[in-house]
């Protein structure tokens, strides 16, 4: 797939992945929906990088007033075309800037999406603006992986994802440890040619996210290993972190 968009463009991920995102994403949204519904209260809820509505739509189906911010108009169109999609208002824009007005009782980011912001300054801006649109006792929830140094060893990584009689798909990574960033391409070779799916992330450990929260006037209320509520510990590979307004 050819694209003229650059890494760091808020629309890049969605424009590349929107057509078959739902087919490729098999994660069950129910645990996240259960958890977030418990924090929503009776107020407005905002999902950043709402995508095609994997979490937002079942949350809205519970009667919760969910809104979204999405960098890709293509992703937003896929959401609107689903049953119930017209009941979730979506603003197409940069999630670091959060181009909507509060107050919200809950703002959330799922599935490592905070790392799609490729500079520490933009991740900090996301925290700052989440704090801006939250109500006095609002919660900001982030789901992310815990970076594994072994994965980023030697500055690069290439591995085969699939090989068939008709095609082969590989994934190629280049890492910049100083910037805590990687750029990747998922490349498929088949009879129709070469298909590219670019992606990039700026990863950071939970402690760095906590520092960003503190600078934004938010405090860590609790951290668990996953949506089911497993305790977070030194061997956890992921986390769900709940921040509250400290004001």
Image (cartoon, rainbow, N blue to C red):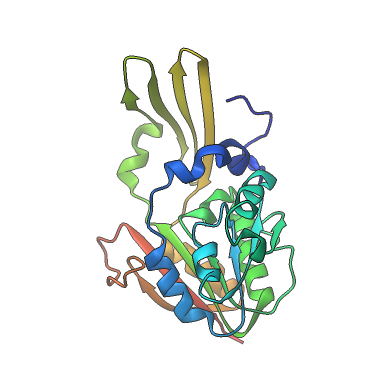
Asked if 173 appears above or below 241 in the picture, the reply is above
Asked if 176 appears above or below 63 in the picture, the reply is above
Q: Quadrant of residue 34?
A: bottom left
Relative to 239, is 113 on the left or the right?
Answer: right
**Depth check: 166 or 101 in front?**
166
Which residue sits at x=32%, y=21%? 163
Q: Quadrant of residue 212?
A: bottom right
The location of residue 164, given as percent across then percent down, is 32, 19
Residue 177 in view (yes/no): no
The location of residue 243, given as percent across then percent down, is 50, 76
The location of residue 46, given as percent across then percent down, is 61, 69
For the C terminus, give its image quadrant. bottom right
Q: Quadrant of residue 84?
A: bottom right
**Residue sticking out furthest to the front:** 83
The location of residue 183, given as percent across then percent down, is 51, 36
Relative to 93, is 21 on the left or the right?
Answer: left
Which residue sits at x=66%, y=35%? 6
For the N terminus, give its image quadrant. top right
Residue 194 in view (yes/no): yes
**Depth check: 161 or 224 in front?**
161
């Amino acid at each position: 797939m050819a694209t003229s968009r650059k890494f760091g463009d808020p629309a890049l991920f969605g424009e590349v992945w929107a057509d078959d995102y739902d087919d490729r994403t098999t994660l069950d949204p129910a645990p996240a929906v259960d958890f977030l519904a418990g924090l929503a209260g009776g107020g407005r809820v905002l999902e950043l990088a709402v995508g095609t509505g994997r979490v937002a739509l079942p949350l809205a189906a519970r009667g919760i007033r969910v809104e979204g911010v999405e960098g890709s108009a293509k992703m937003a169109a896929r959401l609107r075309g689903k049953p119930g999609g017209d009941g979730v208002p979506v603003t197409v824009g940069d999630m670091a800037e959060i181009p909507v007005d509060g107050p919200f009782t809950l703002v959330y980011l799922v599935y490592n999406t905070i790392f799609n912001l490729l500079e520490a300054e933009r991740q900090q801006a996301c925290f700052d603006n989440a704090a801006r649109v939250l109500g006095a006792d609002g919660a900001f929830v982030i789901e992310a992986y815990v970076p594994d140094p072994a994965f980023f060893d030697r500055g690069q990584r290439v591995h085969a994802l699939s090989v068939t009689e008709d095609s082969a798909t590989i994934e190629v990574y280049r890492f910049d440890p100083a910037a805590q960033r990687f750029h990747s391409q998922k490349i498929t070779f088949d009879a129709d040619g070469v298909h590219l799916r670019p992606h990039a992330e700026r990863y950071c450990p939970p402690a760095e996210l906590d520092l960003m929260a503190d600078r934004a006037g938010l405090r860590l209320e609790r951290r668990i290993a996953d949506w089911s509520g497993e305790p977070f510990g030194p061997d956890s590979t992921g986390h769900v972190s709940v921040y509250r307004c400290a004001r």
